[in-house]
Image: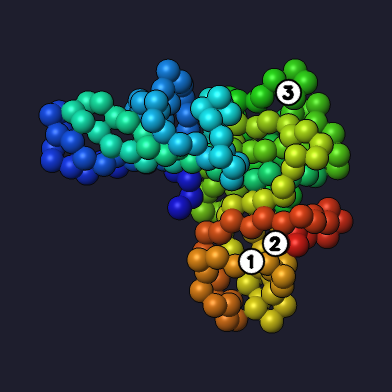
Amino acid sequence: RDGAPSVAASGSGSGSGSGSASASGTITGFGSVIVNGKRFDTSSSSFTVDGQSGSQSDLKVGMTVTVNGSFNGTQRSASAVLQKDAVEGLVQSVAADGLSLVVMGQTVLVDNRTLIDDNILGRNLLNLVSGTDHVEVNGHIRPNGIIQATFIEKKPVGTVTPEVHGYVSSHNDGANTFTIGGLTVNYATALINDMPAPSGNNWNGLFVEAKGTVFNATTTTLSAT
């Protein structure tokens, strides 16, 4: 649930067997798609990128994906590749050492394995303008809500849909609010899918996706839709 890499297979055995196969983790290469060191043929695959139908050319090394498909012997084929980011939204601050930033209330950590897209000047996060620039962060969400980034890219103006994935805390069904990291989500007018009926703080601890159209940087509040 926290985005940690995983691989699973089921079928009639290894080597000469066949069955279903899946992987969840970071793209480490192409020539098909390589996830967690496992190569999946994508010649017959569908692609979902940032919630929209896409193609393999929309993917980049460092993005986090879930791959579903099958295996036959040592050959793996993907039927579907789903990319999901950890957070997409306004950069609120960047640490002076360039090794962390806050995006829509989420703390994002950067290390020497994090890939910075070349649409960020010099591939240096210190060139991002807090309060103006928007980014999409792919990475692994720790149980404490902190995001370990694997890929960060700047988003062009007008292409951003504020969204965040993470663990719910401080759920208040009377106020129709909960928090993810440092972000308060107001879901009073939101479409709610695959969630239990809100009651008290019963959503606390659930891993959710929240999308909206209005992010208030002053109050760090997202109005979910």
Q: Are marks 1 and 2 in contact (CB under 8 Å)?
A: yes
Q: Circle 2 — which element?
A: loop
Label 3 Cα crowd, 10 Å radius (few <14 / some 14-19 / many 20+) = few
Residue 222: % across, % down? 75, 59
Q: Are marks 3 and 1 in contact (CB under 8 Å)?
A: no
Q: CA distance from mark 3 to mark 1?
A: 33 Å
Q: Are marks 2 and 3 in contact (CB under 8 Å)?
A: no
Q: Is residue 194 above or below residue 215?
A: below
Residue 85: % across, % down? 59, 42
In the foreground, 148 or 175: 175
The C terminus lies in quadrant: bottom right
The quarter holding residue 7 reads: top left
Q: Circle 3 — which element?
A: loop
The quarter holding residue 4 reads: top left
Q: Which mark is residue 142?
A: none
Residue sitting at x 69%, y 20%: 118
Q: Which mark is residue 119?
A: 3
Label 1 Cα crowd, 10 Å radius (few <14 / some 14-19 / many 20+) = few
The kind of residue on which mark 2 rests is: Thr
First along the sequence among labels 1 and 2: 1
Q: CA distance from mark 1 to mark 2?
A: 6 Å
The kind of residue on which mark 1 rests is: Leu
Residue 26: % across, % down? 47, 33
